[in-house]
Amino acid sequence: MPKFSIKIFLPAAGLGERLRPITYHIPKPLLPVLGKPLLEIILDKFSKISSDKIGINLHYMPELMRQWIKQSIFASRMELFSEDPILGTGGALKNAEAFLSDRHFLVHNTDILSDVDFERLIETHLSSGNIATLATHDYPKYNNVVIDDAGHVIDVENPGTSTPNPDRIAKKIAYTGIAVYSPEILKFLPSGVSHATVAWLAASKAGYKVQALDFTGSYWSDIGTPAAYASSIIDALSKDGETVYIHPSVENCNEVDMDGHIVIEREAILTKGSSLRNCIMLPGSTAKSGEHYENCILGADFRIDLKESEMIGASDESKILIGTGGSDRKYYRIKKDGKTAALMECRKDDIDFERHIEYTKFLSRYSIPVPELLEAKKDEMQAVFEDLGDVSLYNWLKCRREPEQIEAMYRKVLDIAISIHTKAAANISECPMLKSRVFDYEHFRWETSYFMERFVEGIRGIKIKNIAALDDEFHRLAQKADSFPKTIIHRDFQSQNIMMHKGIPRLIDYQGARIGPSAYDVASILWDPYCRLEDDMRERLSEYYLERRKDADSPIHRFTNSPLLLCRLQRHMQALGAYGFLSAVKGKKYFLKYVPEGIRLLKEDAALVKNDYPELHGLAAGL
């Protein structure tokens, strides 16, 4: 049930001149951000706190706007206000006076993306007696709203331009384009063209409170230029823990090379032999065969080239942050010897740093496809590796592909596992640091404790009634898993740790490798919560692994359903524990989106062993 009964008014009449040529084709409120128009993103957020009516003013491309509104889920709640000429931010409100005059209302510019807390803004307004409550932030480039010590607005410098006066010494803050008003504000607006600041200042002089509520630290982006639009899209990707978005309707991904941050909207066309890196394809755009597109926005009949730092919002083009995983290490793309390279920076207390270096040298020696180590600075806890790009197997699978192509790629990935399990394992004596790292009973028990603490209790808030019986099952499970023959395993052998470099899978994040059951790696990649495979494909790939192990030079262990199934149980509990930890403790909420598939897989595993592990089956069934 929505918390407030409050209307929203969305100024949507503007020409979007600074965004041309994009806005020659798409009005600014309908600019897509990962498949959703700006307008829809704002209304989705608003609808979580109010189901009241929606007002929108129209001027530029009104038919396109009406067409979208007509087919939207918000159509029945909308009231439209045509303007000719455009009336400005104040005139628009005065023009809609009959619509707005019966209750408090929220105003939200339609070229803004933010995580400003609507509830806090509205609650402050309703409890304060303000005539206007402005969402503001400290943004020196736009700080032109002058406030007193109580945070009340007393002046606005260069209204309508958001331009501060550098010669004036005063406490200043920037308006975000989001505000809540009491209907009395309308009497301070003249008919015709005006700016909303006219009402702020007139109301303030008349003794009403116009409060600047500080949201400094909240995310905010003004989609005013192509560079701002591009960086906002990349921000939205990163916030969701992604580097690639491809609309489900897009086809023909085969033989299209992708790297970096990629966004392909509906009705964009990919052509065989095209190449994309840090590219946004808008509806109606085409990536032509043989063409390479880098750091650009593609439209129906235009291409806007940008710097990489503009595309991804980086302040330093010589050192660009990369990666979206759960690690505390920092990875940057840098220039080295005329090429790009990946710089890894670790904390001083990172015990895996030296392991990462030594494992790289060892695995490379036996042709395991890990990135080449270019330089290591142990005193500075830094290492430079070959740059494998930004597209993982997880991202590669986002584009629609033929099942045969997917299966062929997974066979190549399993070949990497086989090389680790056999060729590298046969020479383990050359890497004492790895030889001593055994995935044993204690480690399996740690995984189940991690699952219970971080997910069952931490995320789901479940208290177990018969904890002794469940603990006994975890004990037996760990004993059984520890009894399986052991070899070198990656231990986190999943799709986000497989990089697709020039169409060839390469391995990263192997510093956690241990000596453990080979079935654990197979379970990790084929029953991966990040990427769901069809059951029959999993079966064929499992058989492929077993057949290839027959021909290995070193002794092998042909795992049966029992080792594989128990390793699946362990792996899926570990994964859910990790999602709980990363989301709740590290603040990486995007990991929660993998929870449903992780639970589905755990339920599937537990149902197959319910006779031996009834408490675990009951717990999984109730998640």
Image (spheres, grey):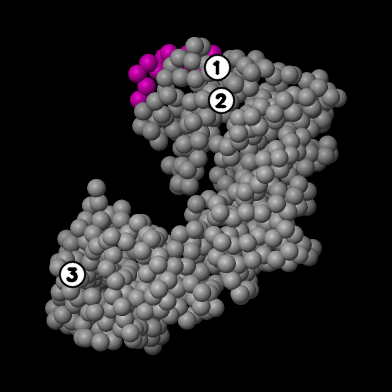
Numbered range of the magenta stretch? 463-476
Of circles 1 and 3, the one toward us is 3
- Asked if the magenta segment contains residue 467, the reply would be yes
Q: CA distance from mark 2 to mark 3?
A: 57 Å
For mark 1, give the secondary structure. Answer: helix
For mark 2, give the secondary structure. Answer: helix
Q: Quadrant of residue 256?
A: bottom right
Residue hosting label 1:
477
Q: Residue at x 66, y 27 (%)?
A: 539
Residue 405 sits above or below residue 606 on the image: below
- Residue 358 in percent (x, y) is at 75, 39
Q: What amino acid is found at the position of numbered circle 3 in the picture?
A: Ser
Which comes before the other along the chain, label 1 or label 2? 1
- Residue 2 in percent (x, y) is at 25, 51
Mark 1 touches mark 2? (CB < 8 Å): yes
Which comes before the other along the chain, label 2 or label 3? 3
Residue 182 circle label = 3
Which comes before the other along the chain, label 1 or label 3? 3
